[in-house]
């Protein structure tokens, strides 16, 4: 019997992917005019629940109603606006055109940018980029564009899946202001995020999803970061420390493995000299436009630079081509979305270990190799034949890292390696990176979260004004706030020097 409550009512909803149970009898009420938070570890079923509400997935059982009427967003696809963790946009269109996508059939006239569209774009800091082709924009701009498209639509339900993972603090504040404006009109807003502070600050209620069920709904005095953390680790045997991973006693850097001298990019940075030792994890930090992202990509050979570079005894383009591996911030750029987990793990191996085997033995050996990779890289999946797109973001990221390591690079480069990943998967990813560094390799990460730098890296370089700061030794800092203070100071100094020059 359906519940005739106002808003969305979900009763006994199930969803399977083959033998994998993604949702197992979900019960949840979502009230009009509220921002409802949804939290849970990777693989818990959060994203599947969002897709079911959005009409992107059809449930195998149960019932959804909206104001007591069977809920079918597929009938009116404008009824739901979704902001995905990985932007779903059109790179060949401009920012403004992407904001207006979906209105082509609403009238005979070609859609034009309205005053409301412009206001939303200006509020999110992309108004001045309206005529720029999206392919030429940063990941942060792409994410803000998708947010603007969702906010500008006259929808009844708004679903935000890790919407601020690529945004600055100021941009996040503006996003949440827009989110609360939407809720104030009586519409429904759901927020999925791993950032516990955002859930506490911006949600009156938070639903905890674990193992395909809503295990608890926290509100009032129970809704605290500690309360959320306890709920999220209930089934995992206790809270995990962040593997960092930083352990000055255990991490002994080896000989120099990587060196760049006079490394110059025509638009982003100039004259950079940088070294890396075997066993080190190095973090690059810097605001958008500082050159930090381009610097990381240049070490993978993705940006044209002048200067000299040496990696693992090789120099020049040969070093960039043979000794490095790069994992982008957007996981979908690394993975084959129509392939299974096992196929994604094996696709780049070239199968040298099965040459000469008969077909049956080859298939058996491939299954064994896939299962071994799943175990080594801590991928949470029921079977290696499960579709990669059905995995959580954290587990997809582990597969992307596994792909990058297939050829044994001496220098591993990762852009925002734990963007949109829960605390447990973060700890596992940190451990994978630490283990790889300890095998005699160098790891360089670019990230925008100081806490991640503090927990994952051995030392930090700040990129500001196209220049590289002296390194900061993370082990010398007793608390993350101290590190954040020095990073901010170096950013300010770098920008000041650039302006003076």
Image (cartoon, rainbow, N blue to C red):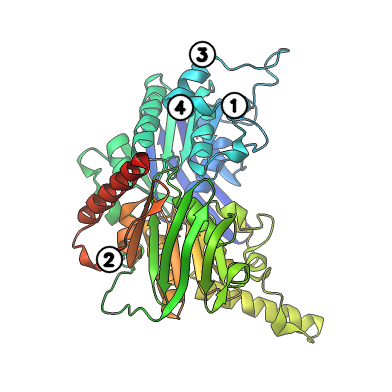
Q: Quadrant of the C terminus?
A: top left
Q: Nearer the viewer, residue 376 or 7?
A: 376
Work out whether 353 lies above or below 125: below
**Crowd band around label 1 with a 10 angstrom C-alpha radius: few (<14), some (14–19), many (20+):** few
Q: Point out the frontmost of discs 2 and 3.
A: 2
Q: Name which residue lies at 21% across and 66% down.
A: 476
Q: Secondary structure at mark 2?
A: strand
Query: How far apart are labels 2 and 3 at the CA level?
Result: 49 Å
Q: Secondary structure at mark 4?
A: loop
Query: How far apart are labels 4 and 2 at the CA level?
Result: 59 Å
Q: Are marks 3 and 1 in contact (CB under 8 Å)?
A: no
Q: Point out the frontmost of discs 4 and 1.
A: 1
Q: Nearer the viewer, residue 275 or 434?
A: 275
Give the mark nearest the N terminus, 2 or 1.
1
Q: Which mark is residue 131?
A: 1
Q: Which mark is residue 115?
A: 3
- Find disc 4 in the rendering and name its residue: 4
**Crowd band around label 4 with a 10 angstrom C-alpha radius: few (<14), some (14–19), many (20+):** few
- Side of 79 where 347 appears, left or right: right
Give the mark nearest the N terminus, 3 or 1.
3
Residue 332 spot, x, y in % from top left: 60, 52
Q: Name which residue lies at 46% across and 70% down.
A: 259
The image quadrant that residue 178 belongs to is top left
């Amino acid at each position: 019997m359906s519940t005739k409550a106002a808003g969305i009512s979900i009763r006994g909803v199930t969803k399977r992917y083959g033998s994998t149970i993604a949702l197992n009898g979900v019960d949840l009420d979502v009230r009009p005019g509220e921002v409802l938070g949804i939290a849970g570890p990777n693989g818990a079923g959060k994203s599947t629940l969002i897709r079911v509400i959005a009409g992107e997935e059809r449930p195998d059982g149960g019932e959804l109603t909206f104001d007591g009427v069977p809920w079918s967003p597929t009938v009116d696809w404008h009824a739901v606006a979704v902001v995905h963790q990985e932007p779903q946009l059109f790179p060949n269109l401009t920012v403004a055109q992407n904001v207006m996508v979906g209105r082509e059939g609403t009238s005979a006239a070609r859609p034009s940018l309205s005053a409301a569209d412009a206001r939303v774009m200006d509020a999110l800091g992309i108004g001045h980029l309206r005529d720029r082709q999206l392919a030429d924009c940063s990941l942060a701009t792409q994410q803000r564009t998708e947010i603007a498209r969702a906010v500008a639509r006259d929808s009844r339900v708004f679903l935000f899946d890790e919407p601020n993972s690529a945004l600055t603090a100021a941009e996040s504040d503006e996003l949440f202001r827009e989110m609360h404006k939407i809720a104030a009109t009586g519409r429904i807003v759901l927020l999925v995020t791993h950032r516990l502070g955002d859930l506490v600050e911006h949600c009156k209620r938070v639903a905890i999803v674990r193992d395909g069920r809503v295990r608890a709904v926290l509100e009032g005095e129970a809704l605290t970061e500690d309360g959320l953390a306890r709920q999220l680790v209930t089934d995992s045997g206790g809270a995990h420390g962040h593997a960092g991973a930083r352990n000055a006693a255990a991490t002994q850097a080896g000989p120099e493995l990587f060196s760049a001298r006079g490394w110059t990019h025509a638009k982003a940075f100039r004259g950079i000299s940088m070294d890396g030792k075997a066993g080190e994890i190095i973090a690059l930090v810097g605001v958008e436009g500082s050159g930090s992202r381009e610097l990381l990509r240049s070490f993978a050979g993705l940006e044209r630079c002048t200067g000299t570079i040496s990696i693992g005894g090789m120099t020049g383009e040969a070093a960039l081509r043979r000794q490095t591996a790069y994992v982008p911030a957007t996981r979908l750029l690394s993975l084959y979305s129509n392939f299974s987990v096992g196929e994604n793990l094996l696709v780049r191996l070239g199968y040298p270990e099965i040459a000469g085997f008969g077909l049956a033995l080859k298939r058996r050996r491939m299954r064994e190799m896939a299962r071994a990779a799943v175990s080594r890289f801590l991928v949470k999946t029921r079977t290696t034949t499960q579709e990669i797109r059905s995995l959580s973001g954290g587990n997809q990221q582990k597969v992307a890292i596994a792909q990058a390591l297939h050829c044994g690079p001496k220098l591993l480069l990762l852009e925002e390696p734990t963007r949109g990943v829960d605390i447990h998967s973060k700890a596992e990813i940190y451990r994978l990176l630490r283990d790889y560094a300890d095998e005699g390799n160098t790891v360089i990460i670019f990230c925008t979260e100081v806490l991640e730098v503090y927990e994952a890296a051995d030392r930090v370089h700040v990129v500001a004004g196209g220049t590289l700061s002296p390194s900061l030794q993370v082990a010398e800092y007793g608390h993350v706030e101290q590190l954040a203070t020095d990073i901010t100071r170096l950013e300010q100094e770098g920008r000041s020097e650039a302006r003076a020059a």
